[in-house]
Amino acid sequence: MNKTIIININSIVFHIEEDAYETLRSYMIEIKKHFGNTSESKEILEDIENRIAEMFSERIETGRKEVINLEDVQQVITQMGRVSDFEESEESAGESYQQSEKEEQPTDTHFGKKLMRDPDDKILGGVCSGLAHYFAMDPRWIRILLVLFVLIGGSGFLVYAVLWIVMPEATTRADKMAMRGEAPNLQNFKRSFDEEAKGFSDSLSGAGEQISRGARKAGTVLGGCLGLIGKLIAWLMLINTGLSILGLFIFYVFNLMNLFGLENPMFFPPLEVLTNDEALIALTFGFLAIIIPFLALFFLLVRILFKTDKMNNYAALTMFAVWIVSVIGVIYYCVYAAQDFREESKINVQKNISKQEVYYFTEKDVRILDANEKDSLKSKFNIQFDGQDFRKYLHGNIGIQFESLDSLAQPYIQYNYSAKGRTYNLAAERAGNILYEAVQEGNTILFPSHFILKNNPLERDQSVRSIVFLPVGSKVVLHREIEHKLRDISYYDCWVNYPDNHQQKYTEWVMTKTGLVCTKQAPVEKEQEENVEEVKATKEEIKQDSVIRIDGSNLTIEVKDKKVEINTKED
Amino acid sequence: MIAENTQIQMRKGILEYCILSIISRGEIYASDIISELKKAQLLVVEGTLYPLLTRLKNNGLLSYNWKESTSGPPRKYYQITDEGRQVLEQLDVTWRELVFAVETSLEGRN
């Protein structure tokens, strides 16, 4: 069973099998290329097409069938003759080129060829086929090269666009000749050369046929090798692109699931900036914007490798339009989201804390819910949590600083809540929605690990700064858990002073006029020890104002300049 | 090899002459011209014929008109023009001269 394609030749409809169609199409392209694009050649082509149509009609009638098959096409081609079989007099060649000489003088460039786009052989703009003519290669390889450039850094897009703009389209026959590098005088020479070659392949004598066949075989093998390498590259790119598409799809689906509440490890942080609905649309736009170029690439590769047809024009246009819309959508959401970060608002709240001898500061991890705690922070804030959105409501951008006060003053904590928004009012509202407060239990002050947002929990760069104002002289103990929230002071620098500090869970500090200072001295080094001993030595020397010397039985006591000697020996 | 080249050149020279002659007999269309040439043992593919016919037409030696056909698209039926007849006569003269030249040159060969 075979697929049938419906074609029409000069408005007469034929049903033709797929493989037959391919063969016919190549033949028609061959002929078109051979005869070029003058008005005369149009007539010739029309005649040929009519004849082909007639032959097809005859076959359908005599064969009493409905579809043209490969055999039919091959026989017709044999009867019409392949391009190599066409015998043309030199006159006709000369004539048609006199025509085109009048049209335009092709300027001499590299090999006498002009770099132009070929409108007869284009996928997008004919850039690659134009290049192929210039370098006398098959356009397929140029296309593969372009695809390669697109994948590696995307420079292919830019190069292609630039070339498209720079290269003029080869519309007139003279242009196409110039594109192929056919100058009139060269062409005549080429023609006679071609004719000789045709005569070569046309020969009816056995010897001639043998030799030509051999030459042809060698050519195809060489072409095959190059083709193989090219094919390999194309295949690799195809697999690469296919996997990328798959990966993107999975990413999209998982993020979609995220938005609908099905939690999973794959999530895209920037999306948290938007509300659920907005995020949905933005994600879709982003996904489309990225995947469509990949899809286009994929189809292009498939087309190159499997020689399938060009994608339906409408489908291609739709894809392009959707892509443009997606890109615009993505840009819109980026700008829109950024707008909501324009203004910043800071709200300050002061809360007193009771004076203590020593203040212990530690952190309470809000995420750990203690069933025994009736008075947990959660209930203090009286918020209802949905099981899954818990994470969204918690934010950790918290900083803790320490400032000094006069030693008799009342200690307090100043909370700075800040948030961003499109307008100042909106930002202020958001800042006001931040719930965060330290809890004092005796001499321990607990800072929650996260702050909670009331109402609208959109990510708007919310942050909290807690500044603890303590009177000078207050002793402070900082627990290890609070380490990451500390600003301006280095927990680590204090911590290294402790011997055996891997076990050390807290550090000790004291509030001075200039701020919190670590009370633990740095461990002394050997040099310092020596200094200490010297100091000790000098002290002793000074003390030598009064010396007691016991020398055998002599006892000498020297006090300043006065001496007393006692000889204990018995005379 | 070289013989083939010359053979082709010789064929080219007379092809137009033969085609003009065939058409001069009466109105005829491309496919039939091929058949006639086949009878004359002058084998030509259609792809050679069409450009030639078109060129002759463009040079004013031939004219054509369309005729509907039962089996497929309409056909071009070619006729020779007056100018064509004149050219044909001139070619007749040339041909006779050539024949004479060749036969004279061939005399005395084994």
Image (cartoon, rainbow, N blue to C red):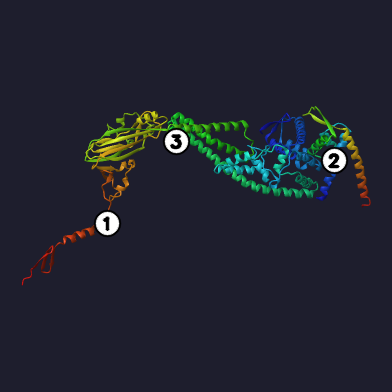
- Name the subunit of mark 2: B
For the residues marked 3 and 1, what is the alpha-carbon distance in whole angstroms?
Answer: 54 Å
Residue type, numbered disc 2: Leu
Quadrant in which the C terminus of chain A appears = bottom left
Quadrant in which the N terminus of chain A appears = top right
Residue B73 percent coordinates (x, y): 77, 29
**Marks 2, 1: nearer the viewer:** 1
**Residue designated by label 3:** A270
Furthest residue in direction front, as rendered: A561
- Name the subunit of mark 1: A
Q: Are marks 3 and 2 on the same chain?
A: no
Residue type, numbered disc 3: Pro
**Residue designated by label 2:** B15
Q: Are marks 3 and 1 on the same chain?
A: yes
Residue A470 percent coordinates (x, y): 26, 39
**Residue designated by label 1:** A528
Asked which secondary structure carries label 3, the reply is helix
As drawn, is A290 to the left or to the right of A188? left
Between B44 and A160, the one lying in front of the other is A160
Q: Residues within 10 Å of mark 2 (few under 14, many from 20)?
A: some
Residue drawn 79% across and 27% down? B70
Can residue A386 be spotted in the picture?
no
Asked which secondary structure carries label 1, the reply is helix
Q: Residues within 10 Å of mark 3 (few under 14, many from 20)?
A: few
Residue type, numbered disc 1: Gln
Can residue A74 be spotted in the picture?
yes
For the residues marked 3 and 2, what is the alpha-carbon distance in whole angstroms?
Answer: 79 Å
